[in-house]
Amino acid sequence: MSDTHDRHDKVRKSSPQYDVLLHCGDIAEDGLPQSIKTALDAFSKVDAELKLFIAGNHDIALVNHYYLFEGGTEENHLKARSLLSTPSIRFLEEGTHEFTLKSGAHFKIYISPFTPKYGASPFQYPSNEDRFNEAENTPSWAKDVGSESSVIPSGAGVDIMGAMGCEHLRRAISRVRPRLHCFGHVHTGYGARRVRYDDKRRGGDDLDRMDPLPQEWVGKNQMKRKGYASLPPGSAEAFKKNAGETLAVNAAVVDGEGKPEDRPWLVELDLPKWNT
């Protein structure tokens, strides 16, 4: 899920049991310490073994220089940061993280709270900065600011449902081909698409081999009744069989008018077993 913007109670009450809950940013509207605490307290009650959270551009108290510039205090910034170390919730910094569930299922996730610069808010970067690729995969007109850890995109945002997002991240996804790519930020882009890759494509950006399938159908009434959205059975089965596909999910809960009209996505993945 993503972009709950203080509307967590409605989501929490309708949520089923999860192995992993992933929130892709903007848990609060004003981003102040008390709002962040209220949201985290609510999500701590969700029935999930692992709860992973990423900061969003509304979560301003987490960014020292921006929060102080906006009139916040160092004390409140430190208070907000202290909320990130609760027993039941993991707040992830930019980079690659690995987790093993009690079942032995193991997965790796790369997350980034950053989005292309648009207006005034934290966690932004100019379009000529490439955070997601190594130097040899960065175009000559862009500046490579990535690191060894930032080459496996999975949690940051490129809007495959529309024309917004980051072309550098799109290239990185096409290069790495993660099984799942989750994001939010663009409230009007809610939905999911399976993505295939065309290695025979020529012309344009040689690293962009994405071939997105049509957007998945979501029945609004059924989604609200169940409390979550999911792939239709036929598409879910096809995704399971085609291991080379990526499922791209814009999981923004609030819509373009700021109303919590959408629901979290429930995605089933076959994960490898961790060998100790």
Image: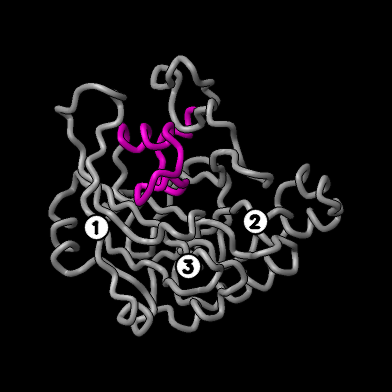
Name which quarter of the figure residue 59 lies in.
Answer: bottom right
| Picture quadrant where residue 225 is located | bottom left
Left or right position of 69 against 213: right
Element assignment for label 1: loop
Report the residue at 74% width, 55% height from top: 61
Amino acid type, mark 2: His
**Circle 2 Cα neighbour tier, 10 Å, few/some/many (<14 / 14–19 / ≥20):** many
Residue position for label 3: 253
Q: Amino acid at mark 3?
A: Val
- Work out whether 141 lies above or below 26: above
Residue found at the very far top of the displayed protein: 140
What x and y, as percent, mark residue 240? 17, 57
Q: Coloured how?
A: one colour
Which badge, 2 or 1, comes first in the chain's sequence?
Answer: 2
| Residue 157 magenta-highlighted | yes
| Residue at 65 percent of width and 58 percent of height | 84
Range of residues picked out in magenta: 147-176
Q: Which label is found at residue 58?
A: 2
Image quadrant where residue 273 sits: bottom left
Q: Which mark is residue 196?
A: none
The kind of secondary structure element at disc 3 is loop
Please state which amino acid type lies under the numbered disc 1.
Asp
In 3D space, how far apart are the residues under numbered discs 3 and 2 (Cα atoms)?
Answer: 15 Å
Q: Is residue 196 above or below residue 240?
A: above
